[in-house]
Image (tube, rainbow, N blue to C red):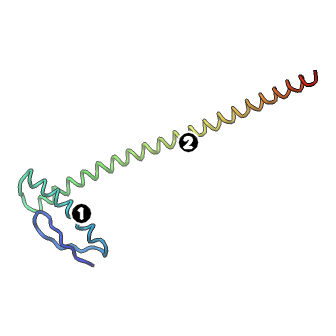
C-alpha cells in the first residue's frame, strides 16, 4: 500500500491508499486544503481539528444538497418516463383509429369505383 504525502492547513500527513490511487488522493487533499484555507481566512486559525471538522461539515452539506437535487431529478425523470409511456399509448390508439378510418375510406372508394365501372 503506497503512502502519499498530503498537505492540509500547512501540515503534512502521510496517507495510505490503493495502488494507482495516489494522484486522486493528492487531488482530494488539495480540494480539502482549499476548503480549510478558505475557512481559516474567514474565521481565523481555530486549530487544525476544528478547521478540518468545519470543512468536512461544509462538504457533507454540499453532498446532502446534491443528493437531494439528484433525487428530485430522478423523480422528474420518472414522471417524464410515465408521460412518455402514456403518450406512446395514446399515439398507438390514434394510429389504430387512423388506420381503421383509412381502411373504411378505402372500402368506400373501392365501392364507388366498382359502381362507376359497372355503370
Task: Identify the mark at residue 85; answer none if there is no mark.
Answer: 2
Give the vertical position of 116 relative to 59 (above or below).
above
Q: Residue at point 24% right, 64% down?
A: 27
SS at mark 2? helix
State the image quarter where residue 54 is shown: bottom left
Q: Residue at point 33% right, 51% down?
A: 67
SS at mark 1? helix
Count neighbours of disc 2 (C-alpha within 10 A) and say few if under 14, some if 14 to 19, many if 20 or more. Answer: few
Image quadrant where one finds the N terminus: bottom left
Say which label, 1 or 2, has the lower sequence index. 1
Q: Which residue is mark 1?
A: 28
Q: Residue at point 20% right, 57% down?
A: 56
Give the vertical position of 59 relative to 29 (above or below).
above
Image coordinates of residue 118 in percent, x first then y, are 93, 24
Looking at the image, which is closer to me, 106 or 85?
A: 106
CB under 8 Å between discs 1 and 2? no
Looking at the image, which is closer to me, 20 or 118?
A: 118
Q: Residue furthest right?
A: 118
Task: Identify the mark at residue 50; answer none if there is no mark.
Answer: none
Image quadrant where one finds the C terminus: top right
Image coordinates of residue 20 in percent, x first then y, are 31, 73
The CA distance from mark 1 to mark 2 is: 42 Å
Q: Residue at point 36% right, 49% down?
A: 70
State the image quarter where residue 53 is shown: bottom left
Image coordinates of residue 18 in percent, x first then y, are 30, 74
Count neighbours of disc 1 (C-alpha within 10 A) and say few if under 14, some if 14 to 19, many if 20 or more. Answer: few
Amino acid at each position: 500500500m503506497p503512502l502519499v504525502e498530503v498537505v492540509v492547513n500547512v501540515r503534512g500527513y502521510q496517507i495510505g491508499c490503493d495502488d494507482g490511487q495516489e494522484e486522486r488522493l493528492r487531488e482530494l487533499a488539495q480540494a480539502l486544503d482549499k476548503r480549510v484555507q478558505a475557512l481559516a481566512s474567514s474565521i481565523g486559525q481555530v486549530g487544525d481539528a476544528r478547521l478540518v471538522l468545519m470543512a468536512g461539515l461544509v462538504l457533507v452539506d454540499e453532498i446532502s444538497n446534491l443528493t437531494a437535487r439528484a433525487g428530485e431529478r430522478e423523480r422528474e425523470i420518472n414522471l417524464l418516463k410515465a408521460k412518455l409511456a402514456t403518450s406512446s399509448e395514446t399515439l398507438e390508439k390514434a394510429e389504430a383509429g387512423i388506420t381503421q378510418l383509412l381502411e373504411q375510406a378505402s372500402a368506400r372508394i373501392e365501392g364507388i369505383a366498382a359502381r362507376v365501372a359497372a355503370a
